[in-house]
Image: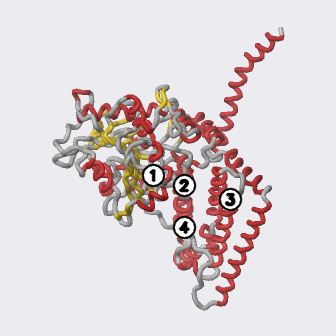
Amino acid sequence: MEAERVNDHGAGAEPLDAVADVIDRVTGAALARLTGGLSPASIGAAFLDWAVHLAISPGRQLQLAADADRQILRFLDYACTVAVASAPVAAAIDPLPQDRRFTDADWQAWPFNLIEQAFLLGQQWCDKSGRAVGGVTPRHEEMVRFTLRQWLDVMAPSNFIATNPVVQRRIAATGGQCLADGAANFLDDFRRACSGDRPAGADAYRPGIEVAVTPGEVVYRNHLIELIQYHPTTATVRPEPVLIVPAWIMKYYILDLSPANSLVRWLVGQGFTVFMISWRNPGREDRDIHFDDYRRLGVMKALDAVTAITGHAAIHAAGYCLGGTLLAITAATMARDGDARLASMTLFAAQTEFSEPGELGLFIDAAQVHFLENMMWAQGYLDSRQMGGAFQMLRSNDLLWSRVIHGYLMGEAEPMNDLMAWNADGTRLPQAMHSEYLRRLFLDDDLAEGRYQVDDRTIALNDIRVPIFAVGTEWDHVAPWRSVFKIHLLTDTEVTFLLASGGHNAGIVSEPGHPGRHFRVMTHPATRGHLDPDGWQAVARGQEGSWWLAWAAWLGERSGQPGPPPSIGKPEAGYGPIEPAPGQYVLSR
């Protein structure tokens, strides 16, 4: 009887467990919307780790107190010198090179110079207080420092009329009209955000009309992709086609923006046959699309089509960001299975190792993933607006507070450009796929550690034998270049690594003639010993100009002699032209 009662209790608990799970998911999803998808538990754990270890470190406390005293004395010395000096005084502390908030000369006038110096000294002390506390995990330390920076960015004197001399000058010059214009800008942005409309000016950059206009045809379509083949513009082309795999966290046309800065148009002009994957923007009904579906229905189907259309079994494949990670997984799977159709692999700002994920991945821990999974469970996907908040935090001074100052306080409408309009044209990520991506790659780092499985069999990046061209960018907050550089450790093949100026997006869109561009590049043979990122940076050859030229030369060295271009599509093989580029999937909102 006792056994029966136990069994009955156990059987009855199963429906109760399911109800409890639903209640927890609904509650978690509601909380996730309230916090913008950021887990309070994740942040709380980091600050608790930091606070507890600081509390039991009296020596560190004394050091921070002494540092605070020194900062106060530096400020008082500067203030006294300014009070009696008749000429400009050297600053007690200079802003970081990327901090452009205090560059205007008005900040050097009293009392704003004191306000600026007090803020910068306090900012330096806060950053120091968040690090070097013994016992705190490196990830928690970086999370604390990042969060402190966000709060300091909120409280910066540049954000307030009373403490920003540039705003005050603008108000005086316009008789206060700039505040009325700024209020109108704010209300327009608020209305657009609530209604889901694109930002003001973005409609001047419409895919297929102003951007994504390189001539081509959609030659294949399934539920997940459209494959675009671009028309040749040269009499002869290299026999090896180029297949580009963009990230589906963004729309493909960052690589085909305006004609002047389109990588696709430029590459076609260099005599290459170019194919581009355009990913479908998933909806709620696609919640069960898995990460491997993007490999099977995406890259592999595209390779089949490119091979059939061109008749060439050696393909240069290039992947951008998450598309590069997928391409690396695909290449390793092909190597395992004896599929030799890749002639080379190029990775644009793409990670294959995630133990150092950069600022974007700082908060991706088990608590954060669980939080996001609840939100995705409720809606079936992760929305671009939910992802956009995370990207804005990474560059809050440039993307958020600059808008507040110039757009709302000074009443200056921010000019739109093609890259900004593309950035506002977001996509969604299916629930199943994104959950697998976060857990298997970010949390567990399965790909780098040899546990990643495809079709129930493990793959290894060191099975890849084709030459690799990997691009990192100097100011990449999404895929830090030192993380991208780890492709050297994970593969046993020739790797050409290039470090370009700029960030995750602008560093890749780097057309010839763009002012101020530079890069470093070096090829590392498979037989040479390891070189760490700093050692590589010290010896890699620096060049001025666009890195696109170096990539095209690298492709050319690994391609055959030019010949007649292939036909557009191949109807007899089932790949006839369907409609002109850019197709339908890129137009989905």
- Using a 10 Å C-alpha cutoff, classify the residue at mark 2 as few (fewer than 14 neighbours), some (14 to 19) or many (20 or more): some
Asked if labels 2 and 3 touch by Cβ distance under 8 angstroms, the answer is no
Please name whichever residue, 388 or 318, is drawn nearer the observer in this view of the structure: 318
Q: Secondary structure at mark 1?
A: helix
Disc nearer the start of the sequence (2/1): 2
Badge 2 amino acid: Gln
Horizontal side of 378 relative to 269 (left or right) equals right
User: If the image is split into quadrants, where does the N terminus sit?
Assistant: top right
Spot occupied by residue 382 in the image (x, y as percentages of width and height): 54, 40
Disc nearer the start of the sequence (1/3): 3
Residue receiving disc 1: 423
Disc nearer the start of the sequence (3/4): 4
In space, the residues marked 4 and 1 are separated at their CA atoms by: 22 Å
Please name whichever residue, 492 or 412, is drawn nearer the observer in this view of the structure: 492
Horizontal side of 465 relative to 354 (left or right) equals left
User: If the image is split into quadrants, where does the C terminus sit?
Assistant: top left
Residue occupying the point 50% across, 47% down: 196
Spot occupied by residue 509 in the image (x, y as percentages of width and height): 38, 55
Residue receiving disc 2: 392
Residue occupying the point 51% across, 35% down: 450
- Using a 10 Å C-alpha cutoff, classify the residue at mark 1 as few (fewer than 14 neighbours), some (14 to 19) or many (20 or more): some
Disc nearer the start of the sequence (4/1): 4
Q: Secondary structure at mark 3?
A: loop
In space, the residues marked 3 and 2 are separated at their CA atoms by: 27 Å
Work out whether 263 lies above or below 583: below
Residue receiving disc 3: 132
For the question of whether residue 267 can be seen, the reply is yes
Can you tell which mark lies on residue 502?
A: none
In space, the residues marked 1 and 3 are separated at their CA atoms by: 36 Å
Disc nearer the start of the sequence (4/2): 4
Of tags 3 and 2, the one toward the viewer is 3
Residue occupying the point 63% across, 67% down: 156
